[in-house]
């Protein structure tokens, strides 16, 4: 049997990782400035994280959600405290797509309405409803397409108002990313988010904040939307939540009523996933990683802002989009193969996406800064 060939792969096989570095099967060392799509939040193989998982493996690694799991309670309490959402409830699942799927379903259960507003440039996952609110026709299969999902332009208040004016009484929810990642590090304006919140309240629609990539300290706040003082009805999380262990979650306002069987999952919130997620929160607090994200992100921006071929830098914390005056693919390849640095791209072919671990140091950022300068000066 062969693998189903859906991923364009670099000819690199990482076999070891530590902190912000990877090593391939040939012994070559790479700086990881992408973290596998913002998944690596506290660095590869953090010793505290490793020990938490090893200790849990010695106890119990899995049982279903038909029994009590005190690790779920511990995770919910710690997450509520560090995020500032102590009065919300937590539903645990396995991925960002699954978190968004459950959020959309829960909203519709709550108000009995059927339509969803999403935004241009969005990416919310590849499952049924999640891909239907993702702005990429290439990955939306015919079976996923429905007129129930209505696209509105990013940061366009006038069009949003018109959409709600026409469809408001049918809108179950409005879903928006705290910062668009795949879309090219697109940041919503405070006015746009405020208007979304206002219209959701006016039309009894649920505001869903997708913080799958932009959450967990990535933006320099625990959640990106917290910079703007917005309180959503539902928040979805994943990626950096488990530092590589598959785990996702839905933070749910107390106005939503739970009932047996309303949501469900086989693997969500298993013992190992909870141990990983608890370890991440412990390290974030102990090592002040949200503050480090603010400081290191600012440092990178200041050091690179005058480099040639950079048109614009969009950044919050360590969620950075570097817009070039050309396709970034060759720059990305040069960084990888000439300088051994992993970076990312986006749906905007000119945007180089930077998502290092929140533990990144000044010395490690300098490796990237110097390499980027060399590559851009040679163009």
Image: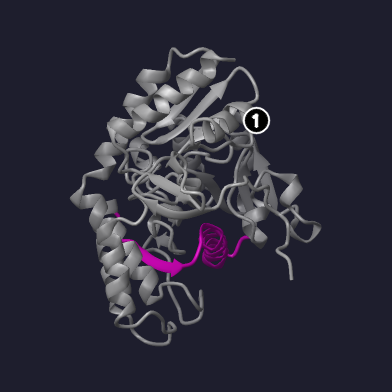
Residue at (39, 41) in percent of width and height: 224
Residue 210 at least partly seen: no
x and y percent of residue 232 in the render? Answer: 42, 50
x and y percent of residue 50 in the render? Answer: 31, 64
Outermost residue toward the front in this view: 26
Q: Mark 1 = which residue?
A: 349
Seen in the image, is 366 located left or right of residue 188? left
Seen in the image, is 146 located left or right of residue 275? right
Q: How many marks?
A: 1
Q: Determine whether 212 is above or below 99 in the image.
A: above
Q: Is residue 183 magenta?
A: no
Q: Nearer the viewer, residue 297 or 106?
A: 297
Q: Is residue 108 magenta?
A: yes
Residue 214 at least partly seen: yes
Local crowd size for mark 1, using a 10 Å CA cut-off: few (<14), some (14–19), many (≥20): some
Q: Determine whether 334 is above or below 61 in the image.
A: above
Q: Nearer the viewer, residue 372 or 215?
A: 372
Q: Determine whether 75 is above or below 157 in the image.
A: below
Residue at (34, 45) in percent of width and height: 217
Name the quarter where the C terminus is drawn.
top right
Outermost residue toward the bottom in this view: 67
Q: Nearer the viewer, residue 120 or 12?
A: 12
Q: What residue range appears in magenta? A: 85-113
Residue 77 occupies quadrant: bottom left
Name the quarter where the N terminus is drawn.
bottom right
Residue at (36, 76) in percent of width and height: 271
Q: Determine whether 279 is above or below 321 in the image.
A: below
Q: SS at mark 1?
A: loop
């Amino acid at each position: 049997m062969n693998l189903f060939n859906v991923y364009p792969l670099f000819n690199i096989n990482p076999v070891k990782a530590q902190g912000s570095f990877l090593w391939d099967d040939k012994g070559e060392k790479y700086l990881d400035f992408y973290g596998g799509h913002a998944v690596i939040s506290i660095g590869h193989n953090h010793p505290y994280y490793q020990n938490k998982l090893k200790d849990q493996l010695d106890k119990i690694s899995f049982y279903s959600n038909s029994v009590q799991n005190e690790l779920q309670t511990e995770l919910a309490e710690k997450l509520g405290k560090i995020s500032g959402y102590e009065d919300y409830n937590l539903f645990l699942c396995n991925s960002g797509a699954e978190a968004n799927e459950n959020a959309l379903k829960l909203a519709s259960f709550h108000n009995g309405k059927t339509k969803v507003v999403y935004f241009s440039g969005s990416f919310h996952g590849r499952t049924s409803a999640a891909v239907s609110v993702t702005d990429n026709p290439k990955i939306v299969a015919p079976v996923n397409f429905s007129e129930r999902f209505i696209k509105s332009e990013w940061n366009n208040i006038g069009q949003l108002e018109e959409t709600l004016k026409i469809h408001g009484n049918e809108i179950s929810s409005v879903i928006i990313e705290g910062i668009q990642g795949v879309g090219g590090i697109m940041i919503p304006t405070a006015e746009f988010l405020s208007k979304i919140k206002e219209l959701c309240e006016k039309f009894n629609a649920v505001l869903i904040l997708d913080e799958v990539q932009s959450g967990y300290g990535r933006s320099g706040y625990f959640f990106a939307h917290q910079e703007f003082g917005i309180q959503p009805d539902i928040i979805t999380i994943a990626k950096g939540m488990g530092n590589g262990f598959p785990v996702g979650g839905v933070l749910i306002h107390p106005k939503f009523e739970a009932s047996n069987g309303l949501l469900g999952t086989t693997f969500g919130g298993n013992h190992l996933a909870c141990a990983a997620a608890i370890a991440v929160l412990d390290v974030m607090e102990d090592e002040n990683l949200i503050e480090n994200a603010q400081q290191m992100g600012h440092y990178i921006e200041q050091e690179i802002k005058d480099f040639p071929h950079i048109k614009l830098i969009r950044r919050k914390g360590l969620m950075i989009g570097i817009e070039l005056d050309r396709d970034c693919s060759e720059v990305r390849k040069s960084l990888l193969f000439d300088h051994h640095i992993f970076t990312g791209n986006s749906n905007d072919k000119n945007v180089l996406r930077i998502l290092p671990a929140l533990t990144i140091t000044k010395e490690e950022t300098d490796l990237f800064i110097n390499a980027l300068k060399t590559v851009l000066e040679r163009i």
